[in-house]
Image (cartoon, coloured by chain):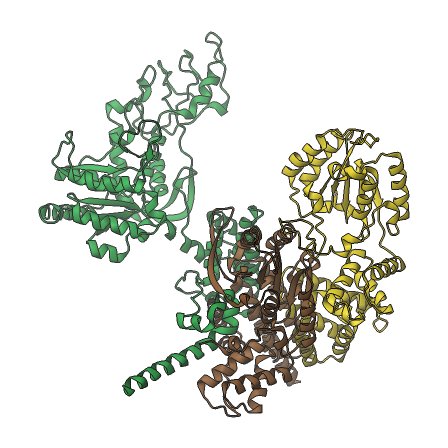
Amino acid sequence: MQAFLKTGKSTAGSGDKNQGATTTRRKPPAPWVEKYRPRNVDDVVEQSEVVAVLRKCVEGGDLPNMLLYGPPGTGKTSTILAASRQIFGDMFKDRILELNASDERGINVVRTKIKNFSQLSASSVRPDGKPCPPFKIIILDEADSMTHAAQSALRRTMEKESRSTRFCLICNYVSRIIVPITSRCSKFRFKALGDDKVIDRLKYICAMEGVKIEEDAYKSIVKISGGDLRRAITTLQSCYRLKGPEHIINTADLFEMSGVIPEYYLEDYLEVCRSGNYERLEQFVREIGFSAYSVGQMMEQFVEFVVHHPGLNDPQKAKICDKLGECCFRLQDGGSEYLQIMDLGCCIILALK
Amino acid sequence: MALWVDKYRPRELSKLDYHKDQAENLRNLCKQSDFPHLMFYGPSGAGKKTRIMCLLREMYGSGVERLRSETMTFTTPSNRKVEVMTVSSNYHLEVNPSDAGMYDRTVVIDLIKQVAQTHQIEISGQREFKVIVISEGDELTKDAQHALRRTMEKYVATCRIIISVNSTSRIIPAIRSRCLGIRVAAPNETEIVSILQNTCKREGLALPVELAKRVVDKSERNLRRALLMLEAAKVAKAPFTANQEIPDLDWQVFLRETASQIISEQTPAKLEKIRERLYELLIQGVPPNLIFRGLVEQLVSNCDMSIKAKTLEFATEYEHRMQSGAKHIFHLEAFVAQFMNIYKKFLSELVMTDDF
Amino acid sequence: MSARKKTWVRCAFSEMNLTATPTPSETMPAKRTRSASNVSSFRVSRSRTPSINSMPTPIPDAELVDLTAMDDDQDADITGPPPEVKENWMESFEPATSDDLAVHPKKVGELRDWLRHCEAMRKKFPAQMCLLTGPTGAGKTATLRVLAKEFGYQLQEWINPVDCEVINALGDQNSGTSYVGSHLEAFKSFLLRASRYKSLLDSQNKRLLLVEDFPNVLLSDKEANFEELLNEYTAYGKSPLVFIVADAKSRGLNISYRLFPDQLKAKHRIEHISFNAIASTIMQKSIKTFCSVMQQPQNKATYKVPSTAVVDSIVVGAQGDIRNALINLHLSSLKGVPSMPTKQLNVSVAAKGRKKKMQSTLKSIGRDESITLMHALGRVLNPKFNEDKTMLHSPEEITEAFNTEPRNFVNFIHANYLPHFKEIDDVVVAINDLGLSDCMLNEYRDDTLSVMGLNVAIRGVMTANRWPVSGWMPVRGPKRIDIKPQATLAEQRLVGVGYAGISRTLYATEYCSLVKSIAGKLVETNSSQSTDSNQVF
């Protein structure tokens, strides 16, 4: 059961474990992501279809094998945890085995740990006599990073132990899960969260924690996080930590925090390239280097910027994006940042001539 | 007897000379009992290490400054012994895994396990975690980074990681999302000049303003380099004069000469000589991507726009190939040969167009 | 060649005359039988099937084997099953006296001189050492044995104990947990004891130690052990010691180069006699001697002498290795073996009488026609083309020859290709291919890529060179990059305790030269200050 305590998603130490500390020590605060996780299925933000199905399951006391997929931060893990809580109540910890990507999930673990857990029998009566669903749940988070071999080893166990164990796989890309497994599960797609829902949740958290924040900062948070609620909450919390409880958080702080490059940099870059002057380009690139902005991040933002830019025509956009792809690829492989961005700049200069 | 860089390094957050509001933020961070993993990123010589030490001092007090260096040996799964030097105090441990080469994964995991598995007994008044500082985190292999991420989560209770990187592009997103990023930009020129002048004042030397400006230009906004250059200049000739010679980094001079040799002649025989010079640089320990960058910067200033674009294209291609190859000299040589080729054609075209 | 063609009998017990196509003019009353050779076992089983009483069926042509018979073939009269070969073939052809040796008499003379020198020095410096090197099959061990017998030495050889445990008895440990000693210790004790103490069974009084098989520890680890060993031996040994080392192709494996550097040889006055490959004239002579041995009555039953064409091709294929020639000769002369297929070489040799004789070598049995590194490099760097623009030497062959050490070969190409190129755009193509091959060779996930990588490099360099610069150029080995140590102690102290936290590359790029100049000046000022303070006193 120790696996459940490892959430593996917090940026800060959760500090839930006691290490023989003296009783006078305060428990450090849990990260807000954990604190404000929904406790029951109704609290889950958005995802109405999934929630409806799950509610029915919870009432009926039975669950199918599930495959939850979708972009990160949309509530997949929260949903299944909430549902299991509702079903099992106190026996929650005994009936659930959670393994995420930070645990060993190679084929050995599948063969031993998962198999052993799934072979334990589950009674249908609670310790206090009330009825309880007679199965256990194994949650495999971030399942797309499991190797194909481990996934294949899993499917047999899924079949054999289907009477007493339900599997719930959570992943970002369904394509990374092998077909035999996807055929054994019912798939639930989680959409990216809409902006207003995110803002509502954030407002709730701010109210509870007493965070002072400007109104339009909410929109910036949403933009930075891109539909990922976890990232939004973490950004908010980090900003709060850094600035202290007295400071009113504004947009600039948020951008600074998250490492997002301000928009004017991208505009300047395009401007410099348009001028066709190599020395200016070199100077600009040096500036970026000195300001410590990440070139990879800049290229990611630049894609969006270029595609939606009104001042460029389509052939130019095509050429630029083509080169962008190459440069991003090379950067990933460890290429030198200076060379990549200079190369991109030169290509843009030639394209805009 | 210490270098000026170390002697006059600020030891407390309040004594930092620039980016003061960031220092304020860091102080706020220390005030709380909880503490995330941190990632300091910025160009070389911007002050990341300084800030990390100040932060640690803020957290743990002055005991952090009693440093000792020791060599730790780790055994890889293939039974090979890897030695790594670490600098540590009672509260933290600083390690640079890039010297372990391919085996940095083992180093990282075992080191963290060693540190993290010892709990503090006497907790009252202190933090319950230790800090591991990983320098030059972008040299970590992807393998080591994934292992780091798992280990970070497992031992989050007893140890926190502070990574210092030059750029976050080489860090996998999983680690980036688990760490709080602190951007340390390079100080601007006025700030460097004022620091130089303060240092000289404390050393009892007079620093002419023009000399300071020249040093700042040469150092490319790298504070460490500026201070080292100034000290080397003082050692060469003190007291200062305004147009005194500032010592250069020898590998940069060598690289400049190499570039001018490439421009002068473009034949296979010349290429052989260039190859010898490149070997010399590699033996000195200069990393190949710096060599690429230096060569490109110098060579490009000699040709017009179309050649510039082509040169850059080839540079990126060969540099990328170098990442997946083992012998760097092959790719460096390929780039030089390719440049010689384009340049030769460019010159001959110039000659031809002159005729018309 | 006689006009008669012998037909090959299928069954040893068959009474029938097999009279297929061109039959011998006389039927042979007795059948020639097979000798005990494995090659024909397949046929033996097949031939037992026809029943004895059936009519003679004409044998299809495929089963007839033509033997190019010798002129003096008189084996038609032998009856009965072949006599078994009782003793080791090689031993029956061993040289007994120094005249039998196929080695050049001058080399034999050198070794003889050394042995005389040992005799002379027996009282004062009994522990003389000698090193014999040369290609395999050059006759080193044979020469030594012959000369040892001549001088009356008992030869004692060291063999690596690979199939038995070297157990050092630790008193009464017979409970099964014996202590397995190190081979090095065993070797040391061999050297010292064998030289000093004689066996009761020794026929001679004097001993000569021979080491041909080196303990692996000496080869893989540092050679300091070996020096110590030799030092001890010169101090305590009592008999001459001979090391025999066969040259290996690659320098890394070259034991004589690594274990016996020049200074070691000078220090212990180790005599180095290097044998050359056996000249083809001497080899021809020896083979003729063998053939005549084979003609002797006791051997006639099992062996027949092969034709001169085969004999010549054996000599060519052996390339100076007499052991190899002997083995091939053995195989070709066994009865029951079809004549050895020979392959024509494209080299013609001016034979006696100015007639150009086409040389042919044994196909697929001859010695490894492996080309040396230098040879192959020459082919790559100076590519030769036929009239129809195809390449003379195929890159695939060169790749096959070196596919065990692709990286080494590519490094050699890289170190040497530039002087052979005239134009820079050819160089561009070549180095591009070298770069690609480097990436392929670095791919650890797929082994077959390394062969492909080598092929790309070879082919790339060969085809890129449109106008090769000819002329002899010295071949350089690839350069090794040993990164020099970076900071002296004084500099390290200057940087302080943080030195450990700075990586190599950072130190090299940021600190190195500046710290050097600072430290240099400080040392000067310190020393000048101390001299000042001395003057004060």
Residue A307 percent across, percent down from the top left: 82, 66
Q: Quadrant of the N terminus of chain B?
A: bottom left
Which of B347/B211 is in front? B211
Note the chain letter of the yellow one.
A
| Residue C526: percent from left, percent from top | 37, 81
Q: Which residue lies at the image location 78% right of the left edge and 53% below the top edge?
A: A35
Placement of the C terminus of chain B among the 4 image quadrants: bottom right
The chain drawn brown is chain what?
A: B
Quick one: which residue is furthest to the top in this view? Answer: C53
Is residue B134 toward the left or the right of residue C254 in the image?
Answer: right
Residue C278 in view: no
**Residue visible at 76% across and 38% down in the picture:** A181
* Chain depicted in green: C
Residue A58, image x, y percentages: 87, 38
Tell which of C395 and C485 is nearer to you: C485
Which residue is depicted at the point 70% across and 68% down? B28
